[in-house]
Amino acid sequence: MIRLAILLLAIVAGLIAGPYFIGQKGYVLIALDNWTIELSVVSLAILVVGFMIVFLLVEWIVKRLYKGFGGSFSFFSRWRNKRKNSAYIKGMLALDEGHYVEAQKQFSRIDTDNLMGIDLLASAQAATKLNQTNKAKQLWQQAAQDPMTELAANLHLIRAYLEENNSKEALGILENLAEKHLQHPAVAQCWVEALAMQGRWQELKSKLKGWKKTLSLESYAYWMQQSSKGIFAEIASKQGALQLKTAWQELPRSDRKDPAQQAAYIKQLIGQDMHNDAAEALVDFQSHPEPQLVPLFASLRTNNPTEVIKKLESWLKHDEFNLQLLSALGHVAFHAKQYQLAEKVLLKRLNLGKDSEDLLLLAQIKEALGQPSEALELYKQSIKN
């Protein structure tokens, strides 16, 4: 519009000034080497206006052509994207419906050069369902190059290697992850499993302390117990059971207060047939019932469980219907051959709820008390349960 306005202004100016310049003899001389161009003022003005008109006309034609071809390119681009989206949607639906071959077929229709990380993940999922593990790994490796799907793809790869017991490859990927991903719960869980697979218990224990808030309470407790159990087992096998007790005392106080590590230590004492030491530890470690430690009472085989029974009975005075405590006391009394106490406690426990293990133990008590018919009936009930 501005150019058109200038052109119109020039034309109007020419019409007004034209009659004045007609009678003038002025001229314009342009000399280029051997070329000489001589124009009158009026001719120059007409030439300039004509040039401007031609320029605007050519510009208009070029723009129209560009828009025409641009629309064609835009149409082709929209058609290609529509085709890609259609294939992706059909592939995801087939994947969700369990038609994995069809899903793979649809994903293959997407131009490989235009595949995004999310497309690659979906295609890899179809490949895993068809047991095409190597192909799935290749797709995950490609998806790991996309920043948006980098973590998800690497987690798939890590889990695949862990399922193959290839902890070396899994750890290789984990160690090269970006720092921002290291506190992700799934990353921590995979790292824990890989270290455990290699029996690197001390390293696992050290890393767990940094993942206490990352992992779930159950997972943290389980793996802390497993790592401590592995460390204690190594000490006991290489240095002996007595050195195990020394190693426990040398641990930091915070470690000795950790129920998961306490449970691992007690299990190792029981495994070394040091039941009296295990019983003493169970009593000393608990001022109140600890869910990770109470079940260990059932594994004790001590002929003098006085302190243990006293501890369990004191807890039951405050919580007489606690099934876990009743079961623990029944087992301790049975293994100490205090059958009357064991029978009384287990009858109370079974009246509060069925349990096949405690039912079987009561049958053994009845047998020990010379009541074979009642024992047989209980054995039958335990089989049914």
Image: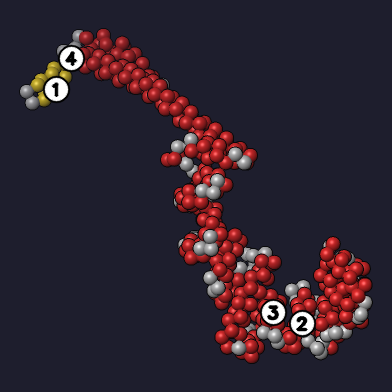
- SS of the residue under disc 2: loop
The answer to whether residue 178 is left or right of residue 290 is left
Which residue is tagged 2? 300
* Quadrant, the C terminus: bottom right
- Report, in whole angstroms, how far the alpha carbon at label 4 lies from the one at label 2: 122 Å
Spatial distance from mark 2 to mark 3, Cα to Cα? 10 Å
User: Which mark is in front, 3 or 4?
Assistant: 3
Three-letter amino acid code at disc 4? Ser
Image marks 1 and 4: residues in contact by CB distance under 8 Å:
no
Q: CA distance from mark 3 to mark 4?
A: 114 Å
- Residue at 57 percent across and 41 percent down: it is 100
Report which quarter residue 325 is drawn in: bottom right
**Marker disc for residue 40:** 4
Nearest the viewer among 177 and 224 is: 224
Q: Position of residue 150 (x, y in %)?
A: 50, 53
Q: Residues within 10 Å of mark 2 (few under 14, many from 20)?
A: many
- Gap in angstroms between the C-alphas marked 3 and 1: 108 Å
Question: Which label's residue is closer to the chain start, 2 or 3?
Answer: 3
Q: Secondary structure at mark 4?
A: strand
Nearer to us of marks 3 and 1 is 3
**Residue 311: percent from the left, percent from the top?**
84, 83
| Mark 1 or 4: the one toward you | 1
Q: Residue at x 87, y 65 (%)?
A: 381
Three-letter amino acid code of the residue under disc 3 = Lys
Q: Specify which label sits upstream in the sequence, 2 or 1.
A: 1
| Crowding near the residue tagged with mark 1, few <14, some 14–19, many ≥20 C-alpha atoms within 10 Å | few
- Report the mark closest to the observer, 4 or 2: 2
Residue 267's disc is 3
Residue 310 position within the rendered picture, expressed as x and y whole percent measured from the top left: 86, 85
Q: Secondary structure at mark 1?
A: strand
Q: CA distance from mark 1 to mark 4?
A: 11 Å
The residue closer to the viewer here, 282 or 84, is: 282
